[in-house]
Amino acid sequence: MHAKARFYRNPEAILTDPNSFARLQSQRVSHFHLDLACDFERSILFGRAELKMDFIRSSNSVVLDVNHLSISCVTLTGQDGNLQFKVDQLSALGARLSIKLPSAQVAGSSCVVVIEYATTPSSSALQWLPPSQTLGKQHPYVFTQCQAIHARSVMPCQDTPAAKCTYSARLVVPSPLTALMSALSTRHEPVGDAKQVAFYFEQKVPIPSYLLALAVGCLEKRDISPRCAVWSEKEAADKARFEFEDTERFLAIAEEICGPYAWGRYDILLMPPSFPYGGMENPCLTFVTPTLLAGDKSLANVVAHEIAHSWMGNLVGCETWEHFWMNEGFTVYLERKICKALHGSAAMHLEAITGWNSLIGSVNAYGCCHKFTELHVNLKGCDPDDAFSSIPYEKGFNFLFYLESIVGEAAMNGFLKAHCAEYAFKTTNCFKWKKFFLAHFASLGSALDQIEWDQWLHAPGLPPLPKFDTSLCDEAHKLAAALAMGETAPEEVCLSAWSSARQVAFLEKLLTLQSECKNATEFVPVLTGIESRFQLSASKNAEVRFRYLTLGVRAGLRGSVFADAVKFLTEQGRMKFIRPLYRDLFKAGEEGKALALATFQEHKSMYHAIARTMVSKDLGLQEGAISVNAIP
């Protein structure tokens, strides 16, 4: 770890969100109700948002976050006349919506602001899919992805993790489509001539704006347990139910560690291929990518991750995106405890080793001194999407794993439950949490003095390498080294007898050796031999397939590997895969660069706006992002 940390924050100061225009010190939204309709022809949602504003201080105005919304009028419930409002000039973070109230609201008072509005086709959270981009090919589909600051493109809101509130909604959609939201469905009923259906929802647990989610499509449900189900287009519903049938087991283990599940139901929605992440922890309804459908449940750990968010992030949330690691690091830590309970300690350590490799890649891509490699990151003037990488996930996990080595695993498990009880339904930051941790373990006395808090929280670069159990990857690493040295022939390899996790470990070791080699083309015989035996370029496991294609592109294998890479890039839009693979193609000589640009230009409309923007930046078509490996 770097010896010198950079301090840019007074930890005792009132934290404000550099990514939000909303004035949380003056007012808070305590509840909102959405009454919206889907217009697939115009690719918009339209209707109204009713926001109950609670005033902390006296104020004669309301300030909210918006982004590419068309606002027609603003009123106050119980009062006649329209209110004056102003939308400031649009920036990369959206715009400030200022609403002038007819009279000052005193501290402790409340009012309900009603905003009639519509989204626009430029609303970054929404992706509108034509029937051709769905599995059934008969009906359109729309979904949202609001993390990190894209909820402001769905509704006017206080778009910061610090602002939690309950919500209710009425969503009108064309029949025979089904609407789902990050809330409990209460009923549905036909509208008018029954060509439309109104779906009603209620979320009684306070959530931040980024957890607002909706999806509309021709969907079917498959039950897993009394409180868990899978939703999907019918063409993949049974496959999804099989893949995720252990969901109830994951949930029960997490409850044993962290306490009761607060959200009522835990359903999973299998998303269209363009969904940009591995999963999104929307309350009551986790969104997951179809790249998890490996056919053998080998990638279901992503569901364990999203379940862990039910406590780490959703129940206990970070105060601003500058403390994002407190959502993701805690979640990875709990996810791996679920893995350990199901598959044993060695399997958990294998996952941690894979995560460590991802962390190395992200730190190397940014540079070891870059501010985005710190845990408590400075996002002033930055779009949080630009800082998104494996660092808050894996560096955060390793910090907690390090603390476990000091206090003991049993004590750390007890602390997780205490952490969830202390901050349930609230938010926190690393400064408050540090005090809570030290108070909780005060009986350990001087044993806590060895914790280098400032180094872990504020220093850039890699943390110290933990002591991992390498028993499940040693053989894979030895085999990879023997192949690279020519000591073993590809035809002597038997990958099919290994789990996909060990296959990933094998391919990652080859990637490491390839990066250390002066001439990557030396790996061509190894890769062609492996491909001839195992057809990894067509593996049903997307993690295996991605790593093989990465090896092939970097080794200069054009021809079929370039074609296979393009096929993978245009079958799905998960940023973990498409961003690094586009970058590797772009760097693979003039042919690769031309292919990357041509492929993206031809297919960019299939990607979600978030992915489209980030790949554009990676390929130099827009300014802004630093290329790093995305994470589920």
Image: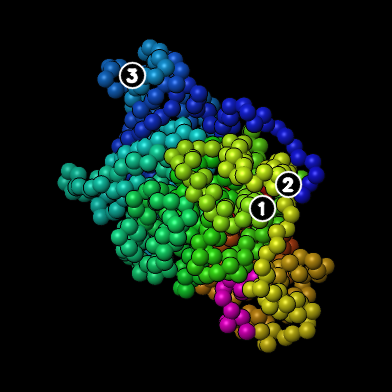
How far across and down, in percent of the image, does residue 489 sit? 72, 86
Q: Is residue 274 above or below residue 372?
A: below
**Residue 597 seen in this snapshot:** no
Residue 406 numbered mark, or none: 1
Q: What residue type is labelled 3?
A: Asn
Classify 10 Å Cα crowding around label 1: few (below 14), some (14-19), many (20 and above).
some
- Per the image, the residue denoted by label 3 is 82
Classify 10 Å Cα crowding around label 3: few (below 14), some (14-19), many (20 and above).
few
Say which label, 2 or 3, has the lower sequence index: 3
Q: On the image, which quarter does residue 545 sit in? A: bottom right
- Helix, strand or loop at label 3? It is loop
Range covered by the magenta-colored residues: 494-506
Question: Considering the image in quadrants, where does the C terminus appear?
Answer: bottom right
Q: Which amino acid does label 2 sit on?
A: Gln
Residue drawn at point x = 35 percent, y = 46 percent: 183
Check contact, mark 2 vs mark 3: CB within 8 A. no
How far across and down, in percent of the image, does residue 153 sit? 46, 38
How far across and down, in percent of the image, does residue 285 sit? 39, 52
Residue drawn at point x = 35 percent, y = 25 percent: 113
- Per the image, the residue denoted by label 2 is 450
